[in-house]
Structure formats: structure tokens, C-alpha cells
Amino acid sequence: MNLVDFSGDAFLVAFFLYCFGFLFYVIAIAGKKWGNREPEEHVRRWSKIAFVVSSAGLAAHLTFFFTRWAGSGQIPTSNMYEFMTFLAMAIMIAYTIVYAMYRKPLLGVFALPLTIIIVAYASVFPSEVQPLIPALESIWLKVHVTTAALGEAFFAVGFAAGLMYLLRVVNFTEKTKSARRQQFWVEFTLGTILVIVGFIIVVFSFRAAGYEATFTQENVTIDSKGQQQTRVETVNYYMPPIVKPYNSQVESYESFLGMDKPLFEAPSWMNGVNAGRKFNTVIWSILSGLVLYGLLRLISRKPLGAVIHPALEGIDPDDLDEISYRAIVIGFPVFTLGALIFAMIWAEKAWGRFWGWDPKEVWALITWLYYSAYLHFRLSRGWQGLRSAWLAVIGFVIVLFTLIGVNLVIAGLHSYSGT
Amino acid sequence: MLSIENTKCECGHQNSVGTVLCESCGKPLDKELAKSEEPLEMRYDGVARRSQKSNPSIIDRIWNFFSSVKIAIYLIVITFVTAMLGTIYPQENTFINLPDPASYYQENYGILGKIYYLLGLSHTYESWWFIGLLVMIGTSLVICSLDRVLPLYRALKKQQIRKHHQFILRQKAVYRDRIEGDSKEWVASYGEALKKKGYKVHFEEGTGTALLAEKNRFSRWGPYINHIGLILFLLAILARSIPGWQMDTYISVPDGDTVQIAGTNYYLKSEKFTVEFYTDDELPDELKGTARAKKYETKAILYECVSNCSDPLKEPVLEEVKKDDITVNHPLTYKGLKLYQFDFDLTPRLNSVKPVLVDKRTGEVYGPFYLPMKEAETQHKLGPFTLDLIANYMEFALNSEGKPTTLSREPNAPAFVFSVKGPGLAEDGEPYIYFPMQKDKVKFAQDTINRELADKIEIRVEGMENVDFSEATTHLNVRMDKALPYLWIGAVFSMVGLIMGSYWQHRRIWLRVDDGELALGAHTNKNWFGMRSDIASALKKIGVSVDPKTLDNGGKNA
Amino acid sequence: MGKSRRTVQIVILLAVLVIGGYAIWSALFGDDKSGPLEAGSEPPAFTLADLNGGTVSLSDYKGKPVVINFWGSFCEPCVKEMPEFERQYTKWKDKDLVILAINLSEDTLTVNNFVKRFELTYPILRDVNRKTERSYGLRQYPTTFFVKPDGTLMEVVVGGMLEKDIDERVERLLQL
């Protein structure tokens, strides 16, 4: 067995340990009202178990990382699969650091599922070791990617604590206009997370079923010389096409649940690489996310926020607020160093320009400006508690867009790390 | 000044206008504020900021505008929102050659693209308003920092040890207790415990019943050092627009050629460009069969022109200054000039051939002679034959009138027309067209054009060793950036400041005992959790056990 | 503290005004070197060899109207245009009109054959390694630059011109 295969096994172990860790955290907070138990003792014991298990998961994850590195001879951060698994690992590291400071294991209730979702999301991408193109062979790239990911991981922990704060503080029984607005957005945030979960479920279900449909698409582009060029491309779908690519013909189509042709065509302005397929995936993710949400609502018969809210009682919201803020404060310099300064050094080495307004660079700058605005809001404008928590949540959305959205929606120099 | 009222504190200290908390004892000066029970706002220790002044003039107004953190935040928000807009469609500068951007955006992105272009978003980051925003952020950085750092410095420089009761008890972390026994001793032992935790402890002289413990004051300067770094960084970027500070051009060098780098006295020769691709064994399944570059390299020599540099009649005299192999991530650098591997082109280019002349009637072979594609000798004597070059075409074709012409100046399909004189040929020469490339020979039917002469003689190349061509052309990016060192200095400052401000916190504890009544207040700029546990663990050392959480006096976390 | 404070404020605001003003100004009016030259700007200087073994500089013709034409034997519209320039040259020669036809870095034989074929009498200059061509930011051939006696560009014409197009422009140029 070679090292790369071994690392794959270690990764699987890490994934299951994370899942069990999460389960134990849920038992820790949900089980405190179970009959004749000392609630505090129960929380203390189970959260300790959960922390140990998830730390074991992190150990397995680190094993994965280093054995894959040794086996492939290159640091595993060069494609989307490797980068996302690294990000998940960084989140666990960041969580452990924050835990060491505050000794609040319960933060794991939110940090772990985030890690699990990202690990699962990573598995959507092909996991083969890909040889590097020359531009990526630089020590600065390695330093840049790992440091930036670590900074982002702290922002993720800030997000987890912020979301926890919201779920802890937002009153789900109140009926005032502002309370309803808060309730809606908390639900919306949870719903968005479910859409991502839905995406992962859909991808793996159809992959397991081996679904495939093929289109030929005629692409008309106007090149830089003003000449019109037509290219015919084959587009493969691995999910039943609800929407077909713009200006395309069905080549092959497996019918799905009685649906035997695409329902509609992607609009013409969606003309990026595989835009039709991406759009189709988005539709499927949203649908499955909504179904998932609907099911959960059906079981619980109340908003998801209202389900989680009581479980968090007993946690001091001020602590959550401070943890969220602290995580971001810790992450900010790391992010600055990794995503901006190291990135500039690398860009200077590789292309001779430290900054080129490439979309990925711009979004890293946007993330940085956003969090610096957050810090100033907090320091000088006194935005604390609810507002600060919302800012932390939105901030992480920007981080995710920078990491994933830019690759999917906007193409740029970094597009080699996308799919 | 109109507002002389209230600037003098009851402790006797004369404060300047705008002071919130007395600079000396810390008592709230504002009457409203003094009545309230809420924890105090401790920003800049309540001293008057420079910008706050009654009846402002124009300069004051501008100053105040940029001194406001609120404005700074707005500027940051506007900047990142416009930066977002700039990423919707590709920017103009991502195209190396875009003759008509207006129609490009409209044709590719429809009406939205047109609006995008008209709004100037297709060149967001070079637009005057985006630069303007950066300038305003820079201004705000300077003025905000200046307005805050000086008062803060003054406030921290001369701190009174015994603070007003209101000041202590309205901190965010507060502890009150009744002390049995000697107060002075208690204070001394608590001070000792704090010293062990790394605090600098100052006792009130004489009485010994009040103390000020302080730790990590330097972290307060972090944000300002960071801001200085950012200002340096912005100035360095600006300096790049000084003529001669920055250069960014591209050169294409075919193998073996020496090309001048435009705008400089340097010439670059590419001895050989090589590209290596991954083999299928090294590639994962889905990439098999694709040409994935593993490494590309230009063996380059940089020359400097030493004389005849601008004389078009003479060949410039070049002197080798640097020899290096340029690869991605490894540019050739010489005196601030950097040459980066940018791209390559594997279209071969014919440079020269060494053909022979064959007398088909006798089977005799004459030559070979040297025939470069450009600037070839116009006469060649080969045995009894004389070849006079009368015309050449780089990319041979027939024009609309059926006359030979060239389609380009690159030797893509070269043709040479000789006038051949020799035994058995016309006195004044017979024309013979020669295509060095086999494909052209066939395509343009060389033998048919040359008619009877083709039966008598033939010009041909024997063997590949007589053909010289460049296998590849390397594209290099030439750059120079004199502002770079300043940029990195700015970045270093900024990083140092960030780390100082983020990973250390300024913590202060004030304590006074009056007739056995202990009042303890503490302030930190970040991390109250740590602040409270400091107080509690020091208390524990002298035998007082408190839960850190109970020290929380409410108020906002910052 | 009033006075020194005011001085500091004024100094800083002035610095901001100068530095920031320069930044915004260069963003607004900064010359875009990559783009082609436009009317009103000054054409880049050059010194090139002619066909008679001498050199010709643009600065030699200060105060005279100059037509700079870039051409190549591979460019069909250029080939059509050249005899028309020849006729214009004979027509306006006495009025101090200068025509400088810069060949696009072709080799000697090609240029000589071409000049012989069309019996061109105005100065033909030889660009080397596309140096001058690049400094003029050429993208299409032929391109003709009409330079006023004051040394600035009157017009840049991209693409081939008919005789009347040239004539009309030269007349305008000579009236200046």
C-alpha cells in the first residue's frame, strides 16, 4: 500500500471521528434535560468526550495531510479537493486554539459541522494527485495558501461563534417586526447551510447512481480581434438536467423520475465555462436544500432556529460574542499575511507583479477590507452583540465566495484550482 | 474660547475642551455622564481628541471629516463594494490587445456589458474615482491616527495612580470588597501577585493604599504602526507612477535571436527555449493525453549596448552582462530589471539553409552555399554557375493580378528568385525560383514554374544538418519596479503593527482602599475574558477566591 | 497649542492635496503608453537609415509639415498607396512637404525591389527589429501620421487611403 492510499484511509477515519465528535456534542447539549441527570455534569462529561474524539479526528486529518504530502511529493494544497480538506483541517486547528484559550468545548457544536460540511464538499472534487504546472512550484505559494487558509479558518470559527450567538440570543417567541426580521435571517442562514448540505447529498446520490447526460453546445464568442468564433463543445451532466446549456442539443439523456428532457434552457448571458451545468447544479442544490429544510420543519413543526435556541440556553452570550470577536482578531493578521502579503510576494516572483487586480486577488482584498471594517465598527462604533454577530456571519459568506464562488463564477488566474 | 465651563476638574486638573474623563483622576466631566451608572466609554482614555473643537473653520471641517472613524468605515465599505463591482466582468487590462473595448463588452455581455463599460467599471481599478477613494482612505489613515495617537500618548504618559471612585467603579471589570487588617499590606501583596503575572505595578507614594498595574502598553501603538505601514504602502504604489520607476513590456525572442528590450539599452538573446511536458504515466486518468507543461525554460543572455547604440547605420556593440536560465518563478534579474517567463510558441521558424546546386545533365554537385532567409548575399558563385538573387518573398503567394507577392514578413513560406548563369544557359541568365521548404515546393509546383530550367539544374538542400531553424519562440515579460522595496517596508510595518495590536492587549488595573473599602477597576482594549481571569487569579494568590465571571460589570465588549 | 496645531493641519492637508491630486490627476490624464497615438500628442523621435547610406531623424524636419507612413511589401493596401504618395510628393515637394515612408523591418532586397518597381523618390527609411513601429504603437498597416509644423500630430489614419484622402489632408496640413 502506498502512502497516498494510506492517507486516503486516514482521511476517512478523520471524517468519521468528526461525525462522532459532532454527535457527542449534540448529546452534550441536547441531553442535559434527560431524566435524573445533573445537567452541568452531563454537559461537562459529554463535551469532554466529544472534544477528545474530534481531536482524534484532527490527528487523523493531520496524518492524512502529511502522508499525502510525503506520498505525492508535493504539499496537498494545489487543487480544490486538497485545498478544501486543508481548510477543514485549519478550521479544526483554529477551533483547538480558541478552545485552549476559552475552554468552551461547546463551540464544537458549530465548528465541527462546518468542518464536516467542508470535508464532504471537498470530496465532491476529484481526489487524484495532479502534477503541478510550473507556475505553482514555489515555496511562496505553499506558504501563501496555508497561511491564508489558516486565517480563513479563524474567520470560520468567528462565524460559528457568531451564528451560535444569534441562535442563543434571537428570541423566537417574540412577534415584533425587528424580532421577526432577525428570526427570518437566522432561518435563512440555516437554510443556506442546508442548501450546501443538499448539494453534497445530490452530488453523491447521482454519482452513486452513475447518472449521465450529454449535450453538444455551440459557443459563439467574439475574440479580442473582433472576430466571431464558433466552437462546438460537449457538455457532460452528472445530474438530471433541469436546465440545458444555452444553445445546445441533447446528445444522450437518461430519463429521471419521468423527466425525459430538460425543462428549460440557460439564458444566453450564462456563457462561462460549463455555465449551464453549474446553473443546473445550483438548481438541484437549492431544491434538495429546500426539501431537506421542509423535512426538518415537518419533523420539528417549528422554525429550526427555535429548535436549536433552547439547547443553547445556559451558554453566556457575552462569551460567544467575545469568542467570535477574538477569533476574528486572531485570524486577521494571519489572513493579512497569508492572503495578501505572501500572495504579493508569490505574484512578484512568478509574474513580476505583486498585484494584478485578478478577481481572486480583488476578492481577497475585499475580504480584508470587510474584516477591517468589522474591527473598526466594533472598536469605534460600538457594534457589539447582535450586529457584530451578523457581521461575522456575512464575513464568512464573503470568505466562502472568495474561496469557491470566484472559481465557479468568475474565471481568473486562479481558475486552475477550480473545477 | 467660549466654553471655559467645566474643563477644570474637582481634583484641580485643567482639562482641554472635549475631554470626557478628567485626564488626571478620571472623573467623568460631563454632568449627564457623571449621573449615570453605566460603565464608562474608555476609548482613548476619555481625553480630548484634536479634531474636537468648538466653532470650526473650513480647515477644521475638512480635518474633522477625515478624522472621523465613521467616515473611515464608510470609505472602506464603498471601496470594497466598488471593488466587487469590478469583478463582475473581466477588466479591460486582462486583454493584451483589445482594439475596441466598447463593442467588445456589448457583444459579449449584451446591454449589461454596455452599461458596465459606460459606467467605467471595465477599468475600475485605474479609474480616477477608485484612485480617489484610495487617496481618501490614505488621508483618513493619516488624520485619524494623528488625532488619536498624540492624545493617547499623553494620557498614558502621565497616569495618576489614585483614580476617582466613579472612574474605578464604572469600569467593565470591577471588584469591591471589605478588607480586614492592614490595607497597605493587602495592596502590597496584591501588587506582588500582579507583578508575578507580568504587570508593572505602581503604588501611590506615601499612602501605599492605591495602585496602578499595567501590562503590554506597547500593544496600544500596534494600530498606529499598522496605519503607518499602510500609508507607506499606498505612497509606494503611488511612486510607481513616477516616470522611469516602473516598466512592464513583453518581448518575443525566437531561438538564437537577439532582441532589444524596448526603451532600454539592453538586448536579450535566447539561446534555446525548452519545454517539458508531463508524460501520461505522471498524469491522473482524466488528464491523460493532454499536454500539461512540467517545466519551461529559456536559456538567456542579457547584453548591454556599449557603443553605436542609436546609430542606425552601424551594428550596436554588445557586451554580455548576465547569463541565466529563466523559468517560471525564476526570473533573470539585473540591476532592477526582471525578465519573467511568460509564454511560448512552438511554431518553428526557418532561419537559413545551405543548399547545393545540382547540374542534372552531368550529375555534378556544386556548393553548398549559405542562404539566410533575411539579408542574404545577392550573388553566389558555384563552380561554373553564378546565382544572382533578384527577389525574395517571406510568405510567397500570388496576388489578385497573378503576380508573386508576400503575405507577411515572417519566413512562413519563403521563396527566392535567382537569375542563373552558367554552361548551357542563356547569356543574361535564366530565372529560377527556389522554395527552401518541401511543402511549398509541392504547393507552388516549383518545377512547373521553372519550366525547362528545372530539367537542367536543381537547387536543393541535402540533409537536415543543412537547415537551421528556431524551434520555438519564447515570450518574456520585462519588468522594473523601483518602488518595490518601499512597498515591502510598508507591508512589514503594517504586519508588525497588526501583530502587536492583535496578539497582546493593554491591561490596566486601578485599585484603591479607603478605610478598608476596596475598589478595584480594570480596563483592557481587547479580551475581557483574559483580563478578568488575571484579576481573579491574582486575588486567589492572596487568598481571595472569586469566580472571574462575577467581575463582569456589564457594558460593551471591545 | 493653537498655532502649531494649525500649521500641522495645513501642512498635512497640503501634502494630501498635492500627493492625492497627483494620483487622481495621473489616473485621469495619465498617458496610456500602450495605446495608439492620438491627435495633439507628439510623435516619438527616431533616427533611421535611408536607402542612400545616410540617416534621417524626425527632428531634422522641425517646423515643416511631415507625413510619416509605415508600409510593408506584404501589405496590399500599402502597395496601392505608395504610388499615390509619390504623386502627392511630386505635387507638394516645393511647398516643403516631407514624406517619410518607414518600411516595416523587411530586408534590403525586398525594399530595394519595391522602390525600384514603383520608382519612388521620397525618402524611404528602414526600421530595424520593429523598434520604431513599436514606439508608435502600431497595430494595423498601413498607418499614416500627419505631423503639423509645430511638431504635434494633426491626425492618425489607420488603413489605406485614396489619393483624394491624402490630398485633402496634405492641403489642411500645409495651411497650418
Image (cartoon, helix red, strand yellow):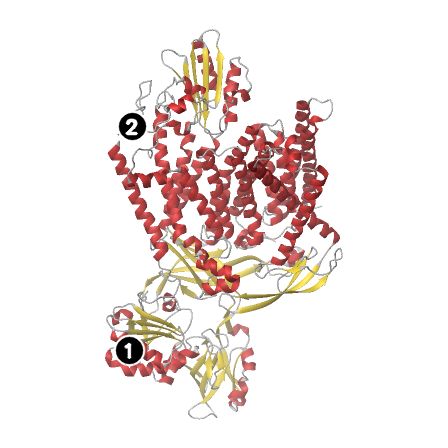
Q: Picture coordinates of residue C140 (x, y %)?
A: 42, 71
Residue at 33%, 55% (x, y): give it: B243
SS at circle 1:
helix
- Residue B430 in the image: above or below residue A233: below
Number of the label disc, if any, that sits on residue B71: none
Which amino acid type is marked by label 2?
Ser
**Which sits in the foreground, A312 or B392?**
A312
- Residue B12 in the image: above or below residue B327: above
Q: Picture coordinates of residue B144 (x, y %)?
A: 37, 37
Chain of the residue where label 1 is placed in the rendered structure: C
Q: Quadrant of the N terminus of chain C?
A: top left
Which residue, given by chain and number where applicable, does mark 1 sit on? Answer: C171
Which amino acid type is marked by label 1?
Glu
Q: Are marks 2 and 1 in contact (CB under 8 Å)?
A: no
**Which sits in the foreground, B539 or B493?**
B539
Q: Is residue B316 visible?
A: yes
- Residue B350 in the image: above or below residue B57: below
Q: Quadrant of residue A91?
A: top right
* Residues at marks 2 and 1, CA–CA distance in whole angstroms: 76 Å
Residue at 62%, 52% (x, y): give it: A130
Q: Is residue A48 left or right of residue C156?
A: right
Q: Is residue B77 left or right of residue C37?
A: right
Q: Residues within 10 Å of mark 1 (few under 14, many from 20)?
A: few
Nearest to the eye among marks 2 and 1: give it: 2
Residue at 31%, 27% (x, y): give it: B16
Q: Quadrant of the C terminus of chain C?
A: bottom left
**Which sits in the foreground, B394 or B389?**
B394
Q: Picture coordinates of residue A28 (x, y %)?
A: 68, 29
Q: Residues within 10 Å of mark 2 (few under 14, many from 20)?
A: few
Number of the label disc, if any, that sits on residue B3: 2
Chain of the residue where label 2 is placed in the rendered structure: B
